[in-house]
Amino acid sequence: MKKVILIFAIFLGVASCKVNPFTGKKVLNFYPNSQIFPMAFAQYDQFLGEHETVKGTAEAYMITKVGQRISSAAERWLTANGYPGYLQDYKWEYNLVKDKTVNAWCMPGGKIVFYTGILPITQSETGVAVVMGHEVAHALADHGAQRMSAGTLQQVGAVAGNVALKDDQKRNMFNQFYGVGSQVLGMLPFSRSHETEADKIGLQIMAIAGYDPDEAAELWKRMKANSGGQGPPEFLSTHPSNDTRISNLTSWAPLAKEEAAKYGVTSFY
C-alpha cells in the first residue's frame, strides 16, 4: 500500500507539470481544462442563480467593458509570445453581484464576479481594471487547478503517513502536526505565491489594455485603509499583506509600462 501511494505521489508530482506562459516556469497541475472548466462553469451558473446580479446599470456595463479589455490584452500578449489558441477553451463572463462584501473572484475558465461592495474602493474604471487584471491573471495561470492539485498531494501525504505509522499515539501526533505544518509551511505559502503572481501578471495586462499601472498601489492603499490596517500575520494568511502588495506593485509599475510600450501603448487612463 505504501509503495502504491508513493508511486502515485511521484507520478503526480513529476508527470503532471504544465508551463506557465507568463513566467516560463513549470507548475503542478494535473487537472486538464476539459475536466475542471465544466465544473467551474456549472458552479458559476449556480452561484448566479442564487444571488442578485446587477444588470443594465453604468457600473455593470463598466465591469463588462473592463473585463473585455483586460482579457483581450491577455490574448494579445499570449499570441505575440507564442501561445496562440491558449484561451480557446475559456468562456469569459463578467458579472456584478449585489453584495456588501469587499471582494471579487474568478473561477477557472474566466468566470468573474465583482461584488458591489468593492466599487467604493476601486472608485474608477482604472481601479476596477486593477482588480480585474488580478482576477483574470488567476484564470490565465490556472491557479484554481493548481490549488486542487496541491490539495490532492496534501491528502496523499496524510494517507501515506497514516498507513506508515502503526502506533496509534504516533499516528495521532502525525495527524496533528501534519495538518498544521502542511498548511502553514505548504498550502499558505503556495496561496500567497499565487496572489503575488496574479498581482504581477495583472499589472502587466492592465497596462497593455491601456490602464495606468501606477494606480494599482493606490488601490491597495485604499484597501489597507478600508481594513483599518488589521489582518493576520502574513505567514498565517492566504494573501500577502497590504504593505507587501503596495511595495511590489510600486516597484513593478515601470516594468509594466515597458511591456505595454512593446504593444504601442504609451499613454494610460
Image (cartoon, rainbow, N blue to C red):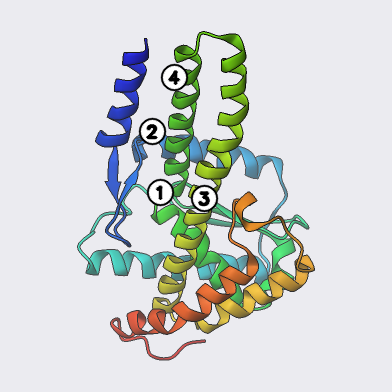
Among numbered discs 4 and 3, the one appearing first in the sequence: 4
The image quarter containing residue 174 is top right
Q: What element carries label 4?
A: helix
16 or 74, which lies in front? Answer: 16
Amino acid identity at mark 1: Asp
Q: How crowded is mark 1: few (under 14 residues within 10 Å), some or many (20 or more)?
A: many
The relative height of residue 2 versus residue 61 in the rendered view (above or below) is: above
Q: Which of marks 1 and 2 is in front?
A: 1
Among numbered discs 1 and 3, the one appearing first in the sequence: 1
CA separation, marks 1 and 3?
17 Å
Q: Which of marks 4 and 1 is in front?
A: 4
Q: In the image, residue 117 lies at what x, y percent?
A: 74, 62
115 or 93, which lies in front? Answer: 115
The image quarter containing residue 207 is bottom left
Amino acid identity at mark 4: Ala
Name the disc covering residue 142, or none: 1
Q: Name the residue under label 3.
A: 189
Quadrant for the N terminus in the image: top left
Amino acid identity at mark 2: Gln
Q: Mark 4 points at which residue?
A: 160
